[in-house]
Amino acid sequence: MTTIIAALVGNPNCGKTTLFNALTGAKQKVGNWPGVTIECKRGEFVEKDYQVELTDLPGTYSLAITESGAVDTALASHFIFSHDIDVVLNIVDASLLERSLYLTMQLLERKTPVVVALNMMDVARARGIHIDVEKLSAHLGCPVVALEAHRRRGLLALKEAMVKLSDQHDASASRQCKPANLATVELRSASSEFAITDLSEDAALAPSRYRLIQQILAACVEQKPRPKVTRSVYLDRFVLNRLFGIPIFLCVMYALFACAMLGGGVLQPYFDSASEAIFVGGLSTVLSYCHAPLWCIMLFANGLGRGMNTMITLIPVIGTLFLFLTALEDSGYMARAAFVVDRMMGFLGLPGKALIPMIVGFGCNVPAVMSARTLEYERDRLLTILMMPFMSCSARLTIYAIFAAAFFRQGGQNIIFALYLIGIAMAMLTGFLLRKTYLRGEASPLIMVLPAYHVPRIKTLLLNTWQRLYGFIFRAGKVIVPVCVFIEVLNMVSIDGTIQVAGGVHSVLSTFGQWITPIFSPMGIEATNWPATVGLITGVLAKEVVLGTLNTLYAGMGHLSYSGMTNMLAQQFDGAIGAFAYLLFVLLYFPCISTMAAMLREMHRGWTIFSAVWMMGIAYGAAVTFYQAATFFRHPGSSVLWIVAMIVVFMSVIVAMRLLASRQDVLRLASKLTERPLSLCDVRCFKCPMRVAGKS
């Protein structure tokens, strides 16, 4: 069977992911590009006697590379111009041909066999756009296939076109796929590894390309009169309104979390009881029937089984959140949310486009950190990454949900929504302070093409939700289950080396927890509630492990079921005040190891350490200040001391940041005068901006 190497290239929001899923189905592999940490998706499908290996490249509007440009664009350009590709599958938006064909021109200049997938034909028809596909193919000099990827229309013709084009072109003939009249704008050869123009050279060629595109559109496209006010325009009058935009955005986010809590809350007891009966009670019964020793029963039932129970109980809330978040993304609203928030973030000097990674962070902080590569300027990318960990990921949501069930039975969604808003506010505060100190500069403008509104298709919606949920459960399970087993072992072994089957106050884990708990007593954690402290420590591995730790330790202390853990939470914490202070700390303290590793790969080690220390300080200060203020009348003297101490420390840090930033400016000016390359090592600070931009 002959193998065809193909690449899928297109603009953002043109249906590229939908087409990739439709072509490859379940035969996909997700990994990282060699040498970088951008997620790479590869899939395959079989057509006749050919096996097509398809690589989904990051969305890009152009192949021109700038020195500080987006990493996604550089990666797509590098792949196209340095790999031996048999066929390039270029997906274009039929309703926005003028914009989409610019990338097509660059691909045809490469002389690689190109198949143009003319997607969203239904949207083009709705807008009164008629495209003569045969004429367009003749003018471009390559096959063009009309397509509606979300309805799977045109897929067979597209596969046949890819195979036919690959079969017709051997290694020498494959370089002839270009329009005859494109010679005037043919890309000159370069000696760099990317073999493509830089931004200035691309700008010089742009007028010729657009003139050719206009000629092609005049010959192949007929635009029928359309009403001045379409449905999308009418909706955008409200969604993008200066007065109503922000309230609508907040209402949509509130509805998202409310649906996740209500929908997931209905199913959660069933997932809990079923998984506990199977993995805890069932496993304990089987081991007892086999006459296993008591320590073995406790290790597997209360360790392994309790970890499985915790992981499965997370599915309803997380699945519901992913379902509604995917629906918002597929509908086209999320791109508009970026424009709405851009005004507010621009006022603070922050990049408005950073909202997109921030929203991704609601699912998981790891892809949110990686998605910051779509920002064009290095300072904006660095600033966005430092803001990302404050976003409440889906793992944190599971903790909020259990605590809301224990302490905020009425209006629990309001508490969760407030936590999300606090996280966003802290992210913006961090960005604002950094923009005024180390990362000074004007906010970059937000330029984005708004996709058309769509009614999400059920099949696509469920597929994308399942992929996200499966990834979360698989990733969480690899951490939760081993940690629960390890915690149970530590809870069974006493400090003198003997085995305590039921655990106890003299176990290794309880001794360590009781020793470190006084550090957290100002935020309401008493010495008897040492499992809460242990949960914070194990939560560094993954935030969802906090629940697994509490579930395992509370069950070991009182042999309680999952529903009994909520009662134990109510007994151990200082009511709703203590619970909210604990949730504040969980929200704000540094993220899981996976996120920290992603940040370390994306930034200098110094910035990663700064982020961890900064978040830990913010979390401790916020939790202590809230708890002391809420319990002020119980102990006014100590509360005043703690609150004043937190304020003084915070202000001292801000002053120190400003002083170091001022010294940085002086050294930068001195380096310009002496023409000496600047090194911030002179001020013993973090990563040099010149090194950030790759100029070291």
Image (cartoon, rainbow, N blue to C red):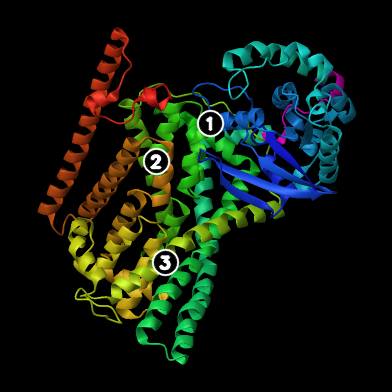
Q: Nearer the viewer, residue 347 or 661?
A: 661
**Which of the 4 quarters of the picture holds residue 454?**
top right
**Direction from residue 8 to residue 617 in the image, left or right:** left
Q: Which labelled disc corresponds to residue 71?
A: 1
Q: Crowding at label 3, few (<14), some or many (≥20) Cα neighbours within 10 Å?
A: some
Residue 228 on the magenta span = yes
**Direction from residue 338 to residue 139 in the image, left or right:** right
Q: Earlier in the sequence, mark 3 or mark 2?
A: 3
> Which residue in the structure is indicated by mark 3?
482
- Number of marks in picture: 3
Q: Which residues are magenta?
A: 217-232
> Which residue in the structure is indicated by mark 2?
600
Residue type marked 1: Val
Residue 353 on the magenta span = no
Mark 3, secondary structure of its residue: helix
Quadrant location, the C terminus: top left
Which residue extends farthest left? Answer: 637
Which residue extends farthest top? Answer: 673
Q: Is residue 433 above or below residue 150?
A: above
* Residue depicted at 44% across the width and 70% down the height: 307
**How much space separates mark 3 and mark 1, taking CA atoms?**
36 Å
Q: Crowding at label 1, few (<14), some or many (≥20) Cα neighbours within 10 Å?
A: many
Q: Earlier in the sequence, mark 3 or mark 1?
A: 1
Tell me if label 2 and label 1 are in contact, CB under 8 Å: no
**How much space separates mark 3 and mark 2, taking CA atoms?**
25 Å
